[in-house]
Amino acid sequence: MMALAACGESTAPKAASSSHTLAASGPAFDFGGVGFAFGQRSTEFTITSAAQHVDVNGLFSLDFPANSCPQQTGSASCDRSVRVHAITSLTSTGAVVDFSPHLTFGKAVTLSSSLFAPLIVMNRTYFADHPSALNRLAMFYSPSLGSAPVEDFANNPSLITHVSLKTGLVWRSIWHFSGYLMGGGECDPTLGDPNCIYVDDGR
């Protein structure tokens, strides 16, 4: 998405804030109704120096810009390939992906999911009026499978999750591999949490 997705008309991002409330009749995000069985699945893929799109078991996607230069233990690999093992897990409370080996990148990589795209697009008028209803889709950093989610976006707005009401795509930038979790927690700006969702139709 970051390097490969076509850009559409973009509007200024709208942060989900306490000024927008979730009505009782708002649509619910049901991880059991997205067409995938609960449980864990594994897959492997190779990162090369070329820009590439990677599907991760249908739950997530990765988009690598050209020369993303993954580094492992301080060794850059801009001109060689790196084999990655990924484990995804889907439960009634969310979807998580864990990558190994742990890598850092010289350019931001995009992690995205279209699990709820039909629901988001169908209810985009509602979500435009109640963007805080999307907070449950925030993608948190997860140090390992089963670990508590971490608000890594709290001090770095570039890591905040974006949601397109035009396509239903949910995405964020990542600079390293270990794991990421969608649905593991709902930030609440009224309680002092940072905004964790931008409504952004640029993708």
Image (cartoon, helix red, strand yellow):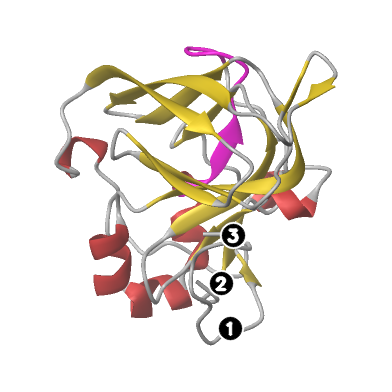
Binning the other alpha carbons within 10 Å of mark 3 as few (below 14), some (14 to 19) or many (20 upward) gives: many
Under mark 3, the amino acid is Met
Say whether residue 27 is left or right of residue 130: left
- Residue linked to disc 1: 10
Q: Is residue 170 magenta?
A: no
Under mark 1, the amino acid is Ser
Q: Residue furthest bottom?
A: 9
Which x, y percent locates residue 13?
64, 74
Total numbered badges shown on the rendered structure: 3
Q: Nearer the viewer, residue 22 or 60?
A: 60
Q: Is residue 105 above or below residue 91?
A: below
* Picture residue at 52% right of the left edge, 53% below the top: 171
- Residue linked to disc 2: 200
Mark before the other along the chain sequence, 3 or 2: 3
Q: Is residue 22 above or below residue 156?
A: below
Give the magenta range.
Answer: 137-147
| Marks 1 & 3, CB-CB < 8 Å contact | no
* Picture residue at 30% right of the left edge, 33% below the top: 57
Which x, y percent locates residue 181?
50, 31
Does residue 25 show up?
Answer: no
Select label 1 or label 3 by which is in front. 3
- Residue linked to disc 3: 2
Under mark 2, the amino acid is Asp
> Overall secondary structure of the magenta stretch?
loop
Binning the other alpha carbons within 10 Å of mark 2 as few (below 14), some (14 to 19) or many (20 upward) gives: many
Inter-mark Cα distance, 1 to 3: 14 Å
Q: Residue furthest front?
A: 79
